[in-house]
Amino acid sequence: MLAAAYKGATLGGLEPGQEVNFEVDLMARYAAPYLKTLPIGSFGDDGAGLRLGVSAGAVADQLDKISAWRFINPPYDWTKGVIIGASGERITNEEQYGAHLSRAIYGKSDGRAWLIVDQAIWDAALEEVRSGKLFGFQQFPVKQAQKSAQRADSIEGLAGKLGVDAHTPQPESSPRIPLATLGSRTA
């Protein structure tokens, strides 16, 4: 069994050596879990426009709504896995768009989540990367997962490595195999 941990990204992009320049206080107050993401943006993303608007009488609302994206496909076989949160429960439909995945990761699990896959899914993902049919940026998640994936021969062993409950009940409506039964697959 394998688990690939992943984090979202939000607020634009930085060149190597650039300082992060966004309003940490606003993020901490309204969207604290997202402070753990890779901040992306430009030097002007410092909250000044928001503060200017409020000073002119505007109302700042829904500041907890952050756009963080985490895609697990391609490789397309990864949608056959199960995304679990810090509680060990499945937290979302794996076939959703990346922004929806991230909303679940940060909204339901404080930014901590793992994609649980068996060896067959892992091998299919590697084959898709080797096929040359994916762009480099689509290959990146698989290559990163190869470096940090946790492996175990049982669901209990994997749960122990991840620090989650191996016996957390999964929703009956789950279209995927419940987490507790993944250990019966070939590792």
Image (tube, rainbow, N blue to C red):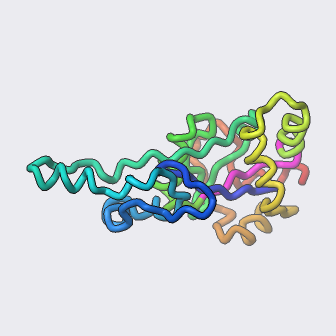
Residue 172 location in percent, x, y?
Answer: 58, 43
Q: Residue at x 87, y 48 (%)?
A: 119
Q: Residue at x 57, y 35 (%)?
A: 96
Q: Is-magenta flag for residue 119? A: yes
Quarter assignment of residue 21 = bottom left
Q: Residue at x 76, y 66 (%)?
A: 156
Would you place residue 70 above or below residue 95 in this image?
Answer: below
Question: How many numbered circles are shown?
Answer: 0
Residue 170 location in percent, x, y?
Answer: 60, 51
In this picture, residue 146 sits left or right of residue 62: right
In this orientation, which residue lies closer to the viewer: 124 or 134?
Answer: 134
In this orientation, which residue lies closer to the viewer: 149 or 166?
Answer: 149
Would you place residue 94 above or below residue 23 in this image?
Answer: above
Residue 66 location in percent, x, y?
Answer: 41, 49
Residue positioned most to the left: 57
In this orientation, which residue lies closer to the viewer: 7 or 137?
Answer: 137
Residue 83 location in percent, x, y?
Answer: 64, 49
State the quadrant of the N terminus: bottom right
State the quadrant of the C terminus: bottom right
In this picture, residue 151 sits left or right of residue 112: right
In this picture, residue 84 sits left or right of residue 110: right
Q: Residue at x 75, y 70 (%)?
A: 161
In this picture, residue 69 sits left or right of residue 177: left
What is the span of residues highlighted in magenta in the rendered image? 113-121
In this orientation, which residue lies closer to the viewer: 132 or 107?
Answer: 132
